[in-house]
């Protein structure tokens, strides 16, 4: 598809709760624009947007798809995003580069928590939004109830530009508020429509709404408001001219009634977007910083003749092509073969082929200019969130504000020798979705994957199997407990070894004492005289640090303890470095055991956002997890619960919360501190650790 000017390009994200029909809506738009010759079906697995094997199998969107079409002499760049909270990072990436958000809601359900989540994210991005009420062909569809609830949640600026005349099975008529006409669609999915004048109650109802719309638009513009006060009305030309501005400055949140699966109301929605929706040219400037470590602000016109600045907002790996970087060009233009500067990483990049994308279908293009979105193949040093800019005009654009992980799992290879393939696969999956994180934890001796939810991790493991031909098991990750002491403890340890030839001898007198939280492990020598040669002090310290790292009671790292060597003995021949390392290690262990040792566990701050009717269940569950509720506050119709819960009791919490709240509860969690483990729990942890150590030693 040929590149167009920014005045002709509309970049928008389809966002909303899961299963509200975002992908089906995108299919109807592609069909109406002639990109496809049939309406794709999620059930049949033949949609343009959801083309990965796991998306077809699960019948849900897992990653954002870029879809491009031409309609009414405008180019639509549609970012079809997943609805499940596990893949919220994909939504945030799309909203970062979109010029407005199309929030799709179900005509048979309440405003769901996923809708509230994406609405909040769109607000944070500062972009306009509109609402599409879908599924109005269903038995219990209630457009008015959905609009009224949206107004309660999001304000009086929520305003329908069309009304479903016959919602429910057979829905095919929309009363258009802008034109005061009845749009009647064929029910064969063709999108064919006839227009006739409205009559009776529908004419009166739309006329009333038309008048309210004029007032709403007038209030969005001082000049129009002055004319409205003078004349008590606006001309149709003034109304239509003001719609764009009202949409842009968030004075109007249009609502459109549709049935995407039957292609009812979709073409009219597209017509209104093409005429009144925000285009790329409406955003006049782009702002960033001079460099990754230089906060000096830089602004430049978002035009094709400005120095190039583009943001990589998504990376995918395609078979037979390699990695594709999806970029939004904010200034200047890009074309294959040019050199740009990755200002985020301070590396140069030569651009490969450029493509306009529609799902997995791609068309090579020669050049892409400001306002457009395209995919670039084979960038060597560029990752999601990076800025590409002209070498002589550096700028770093704001990256992606991605959520912290909410769930963890350890993975274990089913076959030996797959470690390298697993590592390559995990790196690719992280590149495609930065909210999916992995690391090898040397302390726990596990590869730990993290993300937004159990579904996201399961999808990642599935892709490891499908794309990289490796099988892994997911298990609960070990908890990184810590060991510390509650009192002072002493020991005198003698290491003596004589087995022919050179012997080993070292004696260390040591005491340990507790330190304040966060102090780590400290070592000090208070030797007086020449009981131990000073050359052996570092040897003793190495032994102490080795013991502290490997743990004393249950094999977990020691913290907040000070080890002091104050006396000892040596042998003129048999004392050596290794002897004093061993003596230091064992002296530390004995002193530690004599100092009222105790376990510490990681405690996490947990914020839970739920409808009020689930508060009792959520708070009861927090208590069952040995958690403490710290506070509650109201946020609209939702309640926020702040709590602290031990990490040991947070395994799969995201999944449990969604099950407990019918999918309407969401949470965030972050590490707070280490606190002592209750004695009964400590005994279980120690016993389990010793059992594991015994198994490993067999």
Image (cartoon, rainbow, N blue to C red):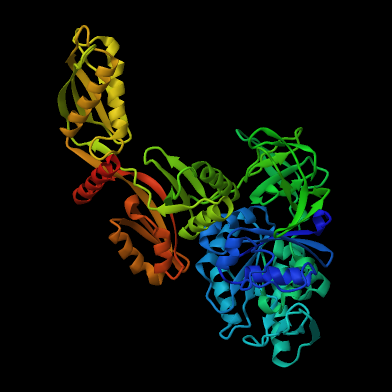
Measured along the vertical axis of the image, is residue 512 above or below residue 408?
above
Q: In the picture, residue 360 is in which quadrant?
A: bottom right
Which part of the image, by quadrant, shows the C terminus?
Answer: top left
Q: Position of residue 583 (x, y in %)?
A: 22, 21
Measuring 52% from the left and 43% from the top, which residue is drawn there?
423
Q: x%, y% of residue 243?
A: 75, 68
Would you say 690 lies left or right of 4 here?
Answer: left
Q: Position of residue 160 (x, y in %)?
A: 67, 76
Taking 262 as reference, is 574 above or below it?
Answer: above
**Percent x, y of residue 82:** 59, 62
Vertical arrangement, residue 497 with respect to residue 72, above or below: above
Quadrant where the N terminus is found in the figure: bottom right
Residue shown at 77%/41% (left/top)?
Answer: 308
User: From this viewpoint, which residue is outermost toward the front?
Assistant: 500
Residue depicted at 20% across the width and 25% down the height: 587
Residue 405 seen in the current view: no
Asked whether residue 309 appears in the rendered view, the answer is yes
Looking at this view, is 443 or 677 the one in front?
A: 443
Q: Is residue 214 left or right of residue 473?
A: right
Q: Nearer the viewer, residue 214 or 316?
A: 316
Callout count: 0
> Which residue is found at the position 74% from the left and 48% from the top?
329
Q: Is residue 675 above or below residue 348?
A: below
Task: Name which quarter of the figure residue 333 lies in.
Answer: top right
């Amino acid at each position: 598809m040929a590149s167009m000017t920014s005045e002709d390009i509309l970049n928008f994200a389809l966002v909303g709760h899961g299963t509200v029909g975002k992908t089906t809506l995108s299919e109807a738009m592609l069909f109406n624009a002639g990109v496809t010759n049939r309406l794709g079906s999620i059930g049949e697995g033949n949609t343009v947007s959801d083309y990965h094997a796991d998306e077809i199998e699960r019948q849900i969107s897992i990653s954002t798809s870029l879809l491009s079409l031409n309609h009414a002499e405008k180019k639509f760049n549609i970012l079809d995003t997943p609805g499940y909270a596990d893949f919220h990072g994909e939504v945030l990436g799309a909203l970062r580069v979109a010029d407005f958000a199309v929030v799709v809601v179900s005509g048979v359900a309440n405003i769901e928590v996923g809708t509230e989540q994406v609405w909040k994210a769109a607000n944070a991005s500062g972009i306009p939004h509109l609402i599409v009420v879908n599924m109005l062909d269903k038995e219990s569809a209630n457009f008015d109830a959905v609009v009224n609830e949206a107004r309660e949640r999001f304000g009086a600026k929520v305003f329908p530009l069309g009304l479903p005349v016959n919602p429910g099975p057979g829905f095919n008529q929309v009363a258009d508020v802008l034109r005061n006409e009845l749009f009647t669609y064929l029910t064969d999915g063709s999108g064919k429509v006839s227009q006739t004048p409205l009559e009776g109650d529908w004419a009166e109802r739309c006329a009333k709404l038309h008048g309210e719309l004029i007032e709403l638009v007038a209030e969005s513009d001082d000049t129009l408001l002055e004319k409205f006060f003078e004349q008590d009305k606006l001309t149709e030309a003034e109304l239509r001219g003001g719609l764009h501005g009202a949409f842009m400055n968030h004075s109007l949140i249009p609502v459109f009634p549709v049935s995407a699966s039957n292609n009812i109301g979709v073409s009219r929605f597209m017509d209104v977007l093409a005429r009144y929706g925000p285009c790329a040219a409406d955003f006049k400037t782009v702002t960033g910083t001079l460099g990754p470590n230089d906060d000096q602000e830089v602004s430049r016109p978002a035009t094709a003749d400005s120095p190039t600045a583009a943001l990589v907002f998504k990376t995918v790996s395609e078979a037979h092509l390699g990695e594709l970087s999806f970029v939004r060009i904010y200034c200047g233009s890009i074309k294959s073969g040019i050199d740009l500067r990755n200002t985020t990483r301070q590396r140069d990049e030569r651009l490969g082929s450029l493509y306009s994308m529609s799902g997995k279908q791609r068309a090579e293009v020669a050049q892409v200019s400001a306002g457009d979105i395209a995919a670039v193949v084979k960038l060597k040093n560029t990752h999601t969130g990076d800025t590409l800019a002209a070498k002589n005009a550096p700028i770093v654009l704001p990256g992606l504000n991605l959520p912290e992980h909410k769930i963890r799992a350890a993975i274990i290879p089913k076959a030996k020798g797959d470690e390298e393939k697993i590592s390559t696969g995990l790196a690719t999956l992280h590149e495609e979705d930065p909210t999916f994180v992995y690391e090898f934890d040397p302390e726990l001796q596990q590869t730990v994957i993290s993300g937004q939810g159990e579904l996201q991790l399961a999808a990642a493991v599935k892709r490891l199997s499908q794309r990289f031909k490796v099988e892994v098991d997911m298990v609960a990750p070990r908890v990184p407990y810590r060991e510390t002491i509650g009192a002072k403890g002493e020991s005198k340890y003698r290491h003596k070894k004589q087995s022919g030839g050179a012997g080993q001898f070292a004696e260390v007198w040591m005491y340990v004492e507790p330190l304040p939280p966060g102090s780590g492990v400290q070592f000090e020598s208070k030797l007086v005289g020449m009981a131990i040669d000073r050359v052996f002090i570092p040897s003793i310290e190495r032994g102490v640090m080795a013991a502290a790292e490997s743990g004393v009671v249950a094999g977990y790292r020691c913290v907040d303890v000070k080890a002091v060597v104050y006396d000892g003995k040596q042998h003129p021949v048999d004392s050596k470095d290794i002897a004093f390392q061993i003596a230091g290690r064992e002296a530390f262990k004995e002193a530690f055991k004599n100092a009222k040792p105790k376990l510490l566990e990681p405690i996490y701050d947990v914020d839970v956002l739920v409808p009020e009717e689930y508060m009792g269940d959520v708070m009861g569950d927090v208590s069952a997890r040995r958690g403490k509720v710290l506070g509650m506050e109201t946020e609209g119709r939702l309640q926020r619960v702040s709590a602290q819960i031990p990490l040991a009791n947070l395994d799969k919490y995201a999944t449990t919360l969604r099950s407990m709240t019918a999918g309407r509860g969401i949470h965030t969690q972050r590490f707070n501190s280490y606190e002592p483990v209750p004695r009964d729990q400590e005994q279980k942890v120690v016993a389990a650790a010793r059992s594991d150590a015994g198994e490993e030693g067999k």
